[in-house]
Image: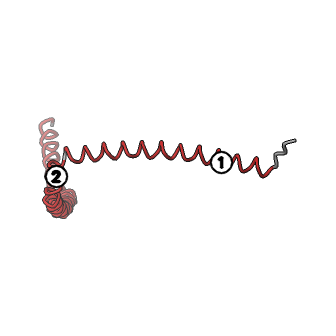
Amino acid sequence: MIYISVRDILLGLLVITSIVTLVFLIIVFAKLSKILSRVNKTMTENEKAINKTLQTLPEIADNTAGTMANLRDISETANIVVGDVGDLVDTFVKPEGPAGIIASVAGAVVSVVQIIKDLNKK
């Protein structure tokens, strides 16, 4: 009679699992090789364009830095102008400002017109 021990079964499962894993790894490495060859082909075909782009990157970085500095200056100037406009509006709207004076003169003119109108009725 043939006896199969648990050790023999486990050893057989280990061999089968190893073979399946080895086949899986071969498939993965074959696909990885194809992908790398495509990437290499694309890099070779576009080498001039890639080099040209890489050469312009420092100029782009300098332009970006200059633009950011200009943007900071414009922002600071805008803050100053907005503050000045706010102060001007506050001055104009105050009762002792031009709007208050105009309102006082207009009120006086209305009063004079009302008095003249009342005199004409009598």
Residue type at the position of mark 2 = Thr
Q: Quadrant of the N terminus?
A: top right
Residue 28: x and y in percent read 47, 44
Pick whichever, 33 or 45, lies toward us.
Answer: 33
Pick whichever, 114 or 26, lies toward us.
Answer: 26
Asked whether disc 1 touches disc 2, contact meaning CB atoms under 8 Å apart, the reply is no
Residue 11: x and y in percent read 71, 50
Between disc 1 and disc 2, whose residue precedes?
A: 1
- The residue labelled by disc 1 is 15
Numbered mark located on residue 61 in the image:
none
Q: Residues within 10 Å of mark 2 (few under 14, many from 20)?
A: few
Foreground tag (1 vs 2):
1
Residue type at the position of mark 1 = Val
Toward the top, the furthest residue is 121
The residue at 19%/44% (across/down) is 45
Toward the front, the furthest residue is 1
Numbered mark located on residue 53 in the image:
2
- Residue 95 appearing in the image: no
Secondary element under disc 2, as helix, strand or loop, is helix
Pick whichever, 99 or 65, lies toward us.
Answer: 65
Toward the right, the furthest residue is 1
* Colour option used: secondary structure
Secondary element under disc 1, as helix, strand or loop, is helix
Residue 116: x and y in percent read 12, 42
Report the Cα–Cα distance between label 1 and label 2. 52 Å
The residue at 70%/46% (across/down) is 13
Residue 19: x and y in percent read 59, 45
Q: Residues within 10 Å of mark 1 (few under 14, many from 20)?
A: few
Pick whichever, 84 or 31, lies toward us.
Answer: 31
